[in-house]
Amino acid sequence: MPAHQSDAVQPRPAAEPGTRPAPSFPGSDPRQTLRGAVGPAYFPVALLARFPYAMMVVGVLTLVVAARDSISLGGLTSAMVGLGTAIFGPLIGAAADRWGQRRVLLIAGSASSLSLLAMAWVVYSPFGTWAVLTSAFFVGATAPQVPPMSRSRLVSVIFRELPPARQQKTMNSTMAYESAADEITFVFGPVIVGLLAATLGGAAPMIGAAILTLCFLITFALHRTADVVPKNAATHQEPAPVRSLFAPRLLVLMAGALGIGLIFGSTLTTLTSFMADLGYAERAGLVYGAMGIGSAVFALAAALFPASFSLQARWLSFGGVLLLGTIGLQFASALPVLLLVLLVMGVGIGPTLVTQFSLVAERSPRGRSTTVMSLLTTAIVIGQSSSSAITGYLAEGFGTQVAALVPLVAALLIILAAVANALGVSNARDYSRD
């Protein structure tokens, strides 16, 4: 294992005197499996708990457009959600590293549910734009970081509970599954938003997200795996310095994740504009699912890639497939062609996202695993929200053809980050052990 890998993914150290070691799950033996270690309920609960996070940006956009009849204000409020997540998402991750996930999730989940309900009320109230923007900021700021916390838990379980011979293979499969789960939520979250808004009204997605948060986030917070990620405050372990989070080896991953978020937001908005041109704007979410199918399937297939197919090579290869798809998007003038292009883009997105999270699991500085995972997930949300606003403005002012350029630019950013990673940014000085 690389010397720079975080303590969260290293074999269980001996407990220091006076400290409480991370719990060991019953039945740990050479035949132990990840599912057996975390229990059968973990994966469905963790999947459902992350849906509100994926519904935020599109839900806010849908709500504001329905209530205030302003696409530009809808795009601006989506950007405010991203701003709130950008500022507070990493802080929530850092708090989980310091005090443990359970306490942080319960507090953040309660605040998130209140923020979602407040947003649904404020938008229909007589309050002005400032109140709408402020409530959108709090929706983003209180969003629980379920995806990075789930990854941190599973990584810790793998390297504490599974036999060494199966750890790396299980790690690859787990990162593939987690990325596929992200794909499912980020692609089908907007579909759920559209169905709820169409059948129950503009506020329904926000109310639904609040209910999902209360039900499944609390269950996720109380799950026994919340205790397996080492807490710095409990172990008295000094985490790596904050400057380690800005090492080139991590910044290049954040740039790549930002590109993925830009793809999500810009593609959905471009697709919405395309379908509106055809007179079927309400079906955009369903067509968008074509990208999710290819992405989820190939994200899971990434677990089958041979070890000789390095992570650097995977990023370059599938980033290239994604770039090819965005080039095809420039020439998609009919729905069947568009569906084919979206499938190609999905083939590129899934393995690229798996690769990025596999790399961040290897490179997380000591005691900062949840923080770094949160930074990567935050970069996706920032990209999604900002590109939704920018692409919406371009589509409204200049047409679908111009809006389609944004996914192409996003794909170029992903390729540039992949090239930087392959050329040795990952070998730059590591501050995590200073």
Image: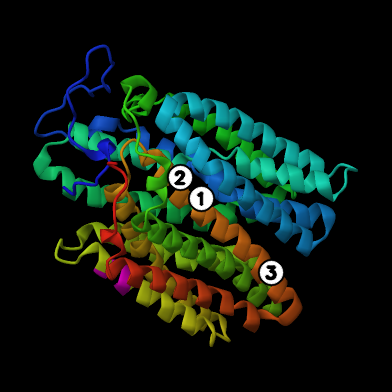
**Residue at x 87% of width, y 47% of height:** 128
Q: Confirm or deny contact between disc 1 and disc 2 (CB under 8 A).
A: yes
Quadrant in which the C terminus appears = top left
Q: Which residue is mark 2?
A: 374
Query: Depth check: 182 or 215 in front?
Result: 182
Query: What kind of element bears circle 3?
Result: helix
State how the image is colored: rainbow
Q: Which residues are magenta?
A: 313-317
Please tell me whether residue 144 belongs to the stretch shown in magenta: no
Q: Residues within 10 Å of mark 1 (few under 14, many from 20)?
A: many
Q: Residue 392, which numbered label?
A: 3
Q: Amino acid at mark 2?
A: Ser
Relative to 374, is 86 on the left or the right?
right
Residue that lies at the very extreme toward the front in this rendered image: 434
Q: Which residue is mark 1?
A: 378
**233 w.r.t. 339: above or below:** above
Q: Amino acid at mark 3?
A: Gly
Question: Residue 42 placed where, x, y %?
Answer: 36, 34
Question: Residue 121 placed where, x, y %?
Answer: 79, 39
| Quarter assignment of residue 359 | bottom left
Question: Residue 89 placed where, x, y %?
Answer: 53, 42
